[in-house]
Image: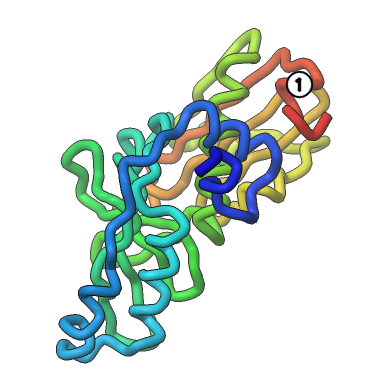
Amino acid sequence: MSIDKEIPEGLTRDAKYFVGVHGYWTGRSDLEQLRSRWAEHGIPSAQIDRVVAYEAAWGGLALPPSPHYDGGPRTLSGDVPEGPAPDWHFGAGDQRTALPYAFMIGPNGEFGLHAGTWTPLHASIEGWVEALALADRARRCARTTTTLTGDEVDGLDLHGFEPVPAVAGLADTWWRGSNSLIAVYRGEAEVMNAPQCRTATIYAGLDAWGLRGLDT
């Protein structure tokens, strides 16, 4: 099967390039064989369908690490849904290192962190992948990189910047200016009630390719 056919739909050209060049597939699991067992434990069929569809699209995909969250999931993979209704979640992939939270897919398809409380980072798994692709390109192309933490993040001046819609940002957002990109990470701060964990990275001195990649 070609790389293009392996890559799920719904990504920008830049993210597809990132997945095709830097990602690799370790093999999907057959979650259909678990359907009857999960159903016996009271998991609704619609929730099982969601996990099966996620695994069919994304299962086994290993991507370069995220700059935060200790790299994100080692590989994307679906896991048993957890309720109760209407807040069903299921695992999005195992952590690379020991963390106080899990990576999960939320009731409306959000990708986020769960640690007793739920903090969605992006409105979709595609948004997470887009953010990884953007971070990879920005890091490679930026002339300077500056990191802010804690209260410094709230002092960011985003006047003249526009949100990057492809990342479908919720707790985490990306902003594009005339020659720079800013990534704002609030997920850990929210899920752990630890405001000192707020982080922003400013990638400055970007050319047209660095700013917009294949969409230039």
State the residue at coordinates (30%, 40%).
74
Q: In this rendered view, identify the residue nearer to me: 214 or 165.
A: 214
Q: Give above or below for 33 relative to 154.
A: below
- The picture places residue 127, in percent across and down from the top left corner, at 57, 51
State the residue at coordinates (40%, 85%).
46
Placement of the C terminus among the 4 image quadrants: top right
Residue at image mark 1: 209
State the residue at coordinates (33%, 53%).
28
State the residue at coordinates (40%, 78%).
49
- The picture places residue 144, in percent across and down from the top left corner, at 61, 10
- The picture places residue 61, in percent across and down from the top left corner, at 39, 44
Is residue 196 visible to us here?
no
Q: Is residue 69 left or right of 126 when viewed as pictured?
A: left
- The picture places residue 188, in percent across and down from the top left corner, at 36, 47
Q: Give above or below for 191 relative to 205.
A: below
Is residue 142 visible to us here?
yes
Q: In this rendered view, identify the residue nearer to me: 18 or 2.
A: 2
How crowded pointer 1 is (Cα within 10 Å; few <14, some 14-19, many 20+) is rated as few
Q: Secondary structure at mark 1?
A: helix
Q: Is residue 161 left or right of 76 when viewed as pictured?
A: right
